Image (cartoon, grey):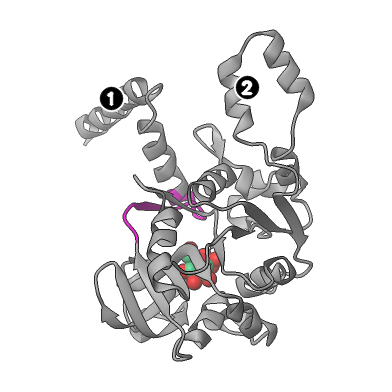
């Protein structure tokens, strides 16, 4: 068994401009799918994968995130007095053990690679996970857990991967596939956001990574890539051909791009329908909506 992965970095410094005006005063990661903030989905997935230390790379205006993970004594005692044990249990899932959570500020928006690099001192010499909370993945076995299990066999670096439409390659890191074994893919390289006609495949990086500290060393160089930003994809690509393993991992599950409005709405519907307490009422509403639309056509 290779080195265990117990630390995860959550890059949450982005401005979330696509969701303005909502994100004017609320961090994007606090926006809710049904009744849980995006960040809670990410944390739950990390916990299921055995992560014990949670490192948030934040920026100005993100203090609501810190409050979210804090205890709320007034609220808790009010709920206790009213005997609301189920809500108390729900609140508990947001609490973090003291010392398990760290916040690092990214002072300048220099890209995802730079955001990850900001956490380098907390990573020291261990493998670590990176979770992008915008990518919400519904799966029987949480995506990062699938990856941690696969990584125990492969070691090295691993990125979650999924086929995307060819005309969407310019929104993703794209794998240049060497050997495709189905779930595990080896590569010749990786390119950040290539135009469709230059993309080496349509297999895209999705926001789950397991990385080695070597990647931090590559990031140290601060090489600028696509969009003039320091790209995590480029730093991982540098590892390919080093003799150390780098793999793509085709996860089982459905990914929602909650960085886009359409993806966020799709996730809201999917997670709403997945809930026992909402399914009947919500699906009845959707059925009615569809039949009204069909009748009108
Ligand atoms: C980031 C990464 C990209 C990856 C994507 C997945 O891009 O840079 O390689 O494919 O996340 O969601 P962003 O969406 O932050 O532009």
Tell whether position 255 is magenta: yes
> Where residue 261 appears, x then y in whole percent?
49, 50
Which of discs 1 and 2 lies nearer the camera? The answer is: 2
Q: Is residue 178 above or below residue 31?
A: below
- Quadrant location of the N terminus in the rendered image: bottom left
In this rendering, would 82 be left or right of 138?
A: right
The residue at which mark 2 appears reads as 88
Q: Pointer 1: what residue?
A: 288
Q: Position of residue 265 (x, y in %)?
A: 44, 43
Question: Could you tell whether 69 is left or right of 284 in the image?
Answer: right
Pointer 1 residue Cβ closer than 8 Å to ligand 1: no
- The answer to whether residue 99 is left or right of residue 272 is right
Magenta stretch, residue numbers = 251-263
Q: Nearer the viewer, residue 150 or 249?
A: 150
Nearest to N terminus: mark 1 or mark 2: 2
Image label count: 2
Magenta segment includes 296: no
Q: Is residue 142 above or below residue 276?
A: below
Please tell me whether mark 2 sits on a helix, a strand or a loop: helix
Which element type, helix, strand or loop, lies under badge 1?
Answer: helix
């Amino acid at each position: 068994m290779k080195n265990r992965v117990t630390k995860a970095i959550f890059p949450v410094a982005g401005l979330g401009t696509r969701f303005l005006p909502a994100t004017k005063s609320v961090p994007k990661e606090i926006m809710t799918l049904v009744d849980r903030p995006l960040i809670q989905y990410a944390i739950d997935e990390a916990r299921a994968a055995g992560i014990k230390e949670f490192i948030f790379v934040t920026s100005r205006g993100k203090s609501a995130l810190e409050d979210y993970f804090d205890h709320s004594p007034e609220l808790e005692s009010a709920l206790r007095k009213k005997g609301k044990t189920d809500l108390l249990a729900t609140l508990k899932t947001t609490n973090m053990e003291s010392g398990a959570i760290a916040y690092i500020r990214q002072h300048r928006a220099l890209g995802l690679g730079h955001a990850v690099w900001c956490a380098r001192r907390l990573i020291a010499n261990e493998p670590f996970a990176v979770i992008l909370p915008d990518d919400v993945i519904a799966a029987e076995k949480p995506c990062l857990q699938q990856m941690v299990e696969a990584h125990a066999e492969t070691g090295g670096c691993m990125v979650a991967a999924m086929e995307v439409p060819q005309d969407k390659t310019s929104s993703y890191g794209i794998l240049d596939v060497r050997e495709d074994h189905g779930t595990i893919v080896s590569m010749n390289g990786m390119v950040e956001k290539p135009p469709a006609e230059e993309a080496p495949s349509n297999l895209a990086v999705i926001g789950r990574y397991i990385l080695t500290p070597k990647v931090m060393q590559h990031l140290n160089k601060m090489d600028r890539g696509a969009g003039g930003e320091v790209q995590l994809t480029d730093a991982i690509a540098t590892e390919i051909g080093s003799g150390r393993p780098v793999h793509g991992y085709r996860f089982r599950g459905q990914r929602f791009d909650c960085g886009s409005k359409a993806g966020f709405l799709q996730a809201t519907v999917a997670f709403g329908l997945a809930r026992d307490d909402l399914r009947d009422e919500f699906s009845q509403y959707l059925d009615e909506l569809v039949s009204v639309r069909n009748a009108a056509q």
